[in-house]
Amino acid sequence: MMNDISSYTTDRRTFLKVGASAIMTTVFAHPVLAALDPTNHEPHILSFYNIHTGETLKTCYRSRGKLIHRAVNRISHIMRDHRTGEIKPVDPKLLDLLHRIVMEEKPRSPLSIISGYRSPSTNEALRKVTAGVAPKSLHMEGRAIDIRIPGCQTAALRKIALNLRCGGVGYYPDSDFIHLDTGPIKAW
């Protein structure tokens, strides 16, 4: 009889520990899981700093699951081709990807834009002087961005982006930035 009671106590304790762990995981994971769903009701806020123009922007681009078009237009403006001034609407999926990274990393600084939209002429000019610029770059479609976040390790940002499995992730440690896009899942 003694063995039955001690066996029951151990099993009961294990059960309670596992149950408590499951509850705590659910409670504390909620904000991150909510950020993964663009239709959730949490405000999606992003902060940017364009290293070429010196412009900054902090805006809520999605609220109650709906895009705020005025905010997306403002983001498209700060992500414009700084060489030509041309603007292309940014892909909302790219913004959602950035938001997921921000929710995971919780940076104190805005996302530094190295390159957002690129006009075809800018992309071609860069191809002539820089290795690795794709002839049909998703930058030309508003579906790609090159970023760094001051105070955050670029390698850590790359790891977060790879784990999200939401598109292309390029890693440029010598230039201290990562490339993100909403194309097929791939890494380089």
Image (cartoon, rainbow, N blue to C red):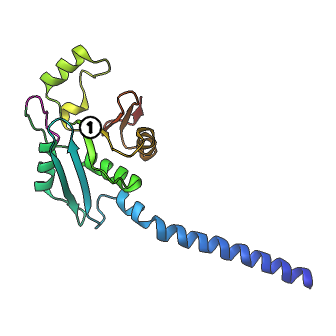
Is 116 placed above or below 12 here? above
Left or right position of 88 against 93: left
Residue extent of the magenta highlight: 79-84
Left or right position of 14 against 89: right
Main SS category, magenta section = loop
Visible residue check, residue 91: no
Q: Mark 1: which amino acid?
A: Ile
Q: Residue at x 17, y 30 (%)?
A: 118
Identify the image quadrant of residue 61. bottom left
Image coords of residue 186 (percent x, y): 41, 33
Q: Which of 2 and 87 is in front in this view?
A: 87
Left or right position of 100 against 9: left
Number of numbered discs present? Answer: 1
Identify the image quadrant of residue 115. top left
Q: Find disc 1 in the rendering and name its residue.
A: 145
Location of the C terminus (image quadrant)? top left
Badge 1: residue crowd in 10 Å (few <14, some 14–19, many ≥20): many
Q: Nearer the viewer, residue 103 or 166?
A: 103
Q: Residue at x 26, y 49 (%)?
A: 95
Image coords of residue 116 (percent x, y): 21, 36
